[in-house]
Image (tube, rainbow, N blue to C red):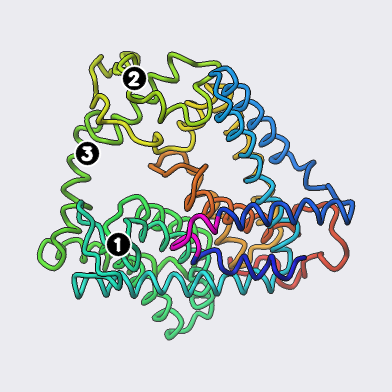
Amino acid sequence: MKKPVVWGMYAFPLLLCYALAPAEILICLIVGAFVVHSAICRDWSWVRQPWFVLSVVLGADIALASAATGSVHAVVQSVLLLRYPVFVAAMAFWILSDPKDRHHLARAYAWVAMWMVVGSWQQYLWGRNIMGYGRWEDGALLGPLWAPRAGQALFMTAFPGLMPVIISLTQRRTRGGLLCAGGLLVLLILTFLLISQRMPTLLFLFGTLCLALMVRPLRLPFILACVIGMGGIAVSPVVAPQAYNKLVISFEHQMHGFADSPYGMLFIRAGVMVSDHPWVGMGYDGFRINCPNPIYFRGLPALGIPDGPHGGAPGCNLHPHNYYIQVATMAGWPGAILFCLVVMAMLYPMARGLRAHRGAEQMVMCVLAFVIIWPLQSTSSFTTQPTAGWVFIALGWALAATRKGWDSGHTGADIPDKRHMGQGT
């Protein structure tokens, strides 16, 4: 069963850009195939992984919180969340266990990343993308898509697809390698600035900074790319005024009056919900269902935010735009603590595997996993596509890339070659 499943994995970056329902169906098919494979091989070792056990406990907690609301639909949805940790285990223990398959998947990601870059510049230069759409109403570029998702798609594909290439070029320690690496970094940073989606841009810079701290030859190209990027921001009022308004003016206004910004209103509303239901939460999708209820149109005096409507019903959204706050609204503080434990239990084997083998792929995927679950950021919902696909593929990929460093049950063929230990530092 593995060959068709692996070929299906290669289609994921395109599906998550253009076909969300098929992407969700493919995830479910992979989960089913992995369970059948585990039953045939009588190998359920992945079930005993601490992060998986904690994920099951978290899912049970969300299901109980949903049951307390009396919604059968919410209970079913919370139970079905289990497909995501099983999907992560499928990639770590089965689909991406072969480095060649991970290399081919990185190529697929690289092609989609370049497609996002070309589509973004084409829309910037001609005013319309290949679908005939102009900029989004807030000034963001759509790239070759029909919705403002190009920034997230570029970050999630360029990091695993192009960053290992950039690291390999810098490790050659030649002038040509450094120039090529710096040129690719400059191209990516300028493209992020043109797209004008703040969070993907900040996450890309944060992740690249983490890699530059780990890989010494990457530091100079990163510094030069940042300097050129700042120069791009300086001239953006003339060459890209929409990008300047979104990245600088709008960001400055939101930071000065964060409580009255759209994100601030969401966080305040979620905080009020959690303070009113600290132990049980509001069940699956509880934030979206209860956000328009005037009973939650209050402030957070404990944080210095006075009572007020803070946007009222128009200030609502489908989710609170943060993974940790989203889980807290679903299952209260116990659920939020469990979610933090899941995150730590997943990062620990990655860090242990990274200490054993610091290759370019291992460093890139571990940093990507660390950045995407960084708590201080604005995010989409991790229970729906395309965010769920990007996030859980990255986590499974990171575990697969570092597995030979933390899997105590590996065979002799899986033992890393000591001649390559420390490569990339």
Residue highlighted by disc 3: 254
**In the drawing, does residue 83 fall left or right of residue 48?**
left
Q: Name the residue at 30% across, 73% down.
A: 130
Magenta includes 345?
A: no
Q: Amino acid at mark 2?
A: Asn
Of the numbered discs 2 and 3, the one sitting upstream in the chain is 3
Q: Is residue 212 above or below residue 270?
A: below
Disc 2 element: loop
Residue highlighted by disc 2: 293
Task: Give percent across and percent down for residue 385.
Answer: 49, 50
Q: Amino acid at mark 1?
A: Leu
Q: Name the residue at 67% across, 56% down.
A: 29
Of 413 and 92, the residue lying toward us: 92
Task: Give percent across and percent down for residue 213.
Answer: 48, 58
Using the rendered image of the protein, determine whether residue 228 is visible from the camera's viewpoint.
Answer: yes
Of 119 and 275, the residue lying toward us: 119
Of the numbered discs 3 and 1, the one sitting upstream in the chain is 1
Residue numbers of the magenta segment: 15-23
Q: Name the residue at 41% across, 35% down.
A: 319
Q: Name the residue at 24% across, 20% down.
A: 309
**In the drawing, does residue 290 fall left or right of residue 74?**
left
Q: Amino acid at mark 3?
A: Gln
> In the orientation shown, which residue stands out farthest toward the bottom?
176
Instruction: Give the class, few, some or many, for how many residues have Cα within 10 Å of label 3's Cα (few <14, many ≥20).
Output: some
Of the numbered discs 2 and 1, the one sitting upstream in the chain is 1
Distance of label 2 from label 3 (alpha carbons): 25 Å
